[in-house]
Amino acid sequence: MTGPRLRAVLVEAFAAQPCQGNGAAVVLLEQPMPDPWLQALATSFRQSETAFLLPQQSGGWALRWFTPSCEVPLCGHATLAATLALGHWELLAPGMSVSLASRSGPLAVSLLADPSGTASLVLPGGGLESAPCPEYLPALIGCQPLQFWGSALGYRVALLDEAVDLEALAFDPGALQAQERPGLVLMQAFSGDSADRPRVLGQSADYQLRFFAPGLGIPEDPVTGSAHALVAPWWLTTLDRSQVVGWQPSARRGGMLCESPAADLVRLTGSGHLLWDGLINAGGMPLAGGDWSVCKGC
């Protein structure tokens, strides 16, 4: 099969070493592509998200994210992966910043010069709204949350006692019910000596979380930027810190530095590992169409 070949990479985001963190495919488009094509490719990649970058006539890029089953309005790890991909393709120089147009508005990202393979992104943050814990949830997860919240993002958040072994906690994510299915965050503070905690870019983790989203086709997401952006403001206030370090003890673990550069915004900084670099053979596929007007800030 012959036809246009599109550049693509797979980046393991929020990972300090290979086969860790959260994998995201990143595809550099040459023109708008129809949504069924984008979805079919994301389904074929079978990553928790696939990021599509489209160059804009005015400069910069528009960015969209697809899980294997649907498009999502915001994805932190795939945005970090897209930023590192732009650096790999020499379309963004170390030390430079750019604004990516997305369904959630313009997202400021930066490729850091030191250390290499590190980037930062600014996402909407906060917005936790106190809510009653669903009656079925404690029995499902095996413990009673200390606090429970909803959010405008659609995720539900439960704070667990430090004594709960979050890493070993096991339950069937498919049993989550309607309001929790789009995203459930289980989080807790780290206890004990900071020297024994996981480290991210040389700093000890302050809290950890796990994220489950069966409603998005993701039973458990390895390292979830949007979840950390949602809860980091609460941790910054609770711990009275200007920066906190979040960790995700999933099978493909990883973490990030979190700080708030302005009200309702969170900057996430993390590293990534380029797993593969290649070309997609687009021959025989529809090569035009698609409405990218959903991206705000173009």
Image: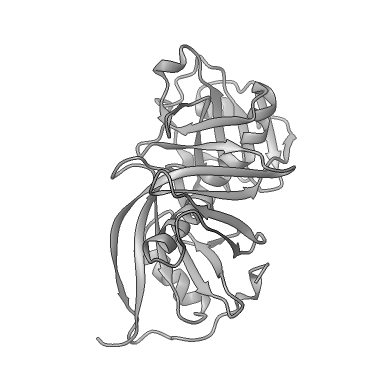
Provide residue 120's location: percent of width, then percent of height.
52, 48
Provide residue 244's location: percent of width, then percent of height.
57, 30
- Give the residue displayed 51% in from the left and 62% down from the top: 65
Q: Quadrant of residue 202?
A: top left
- Give the residue displayed 55% in from the left and 29% down from the top: 187
Provide residue 228's location: percent of width, then percent of height.
57, 39
Q: Which colour scheme is used?
A: one colour
Q: Nearer the viewer, residue 268 or 153?
A: 268
Provide residue 264's location: percent of width, then percent of height.
72, 44
In the rendered image, is residue 239 in sight?
yes
Q: Quadrant of residue 131?
A: top right
Q: Quadrant of residue 24?
A: bottom left
Q: Is residue 203 above or below residue 178?
A: above
Q: How many labels does the image show?
A: 0
Q: Is residue 13 above or below residue 5?
A: above
- Quarter of the figure with the N terminus: bottom left
- Quarter of the figure with the C terminus: bottom right
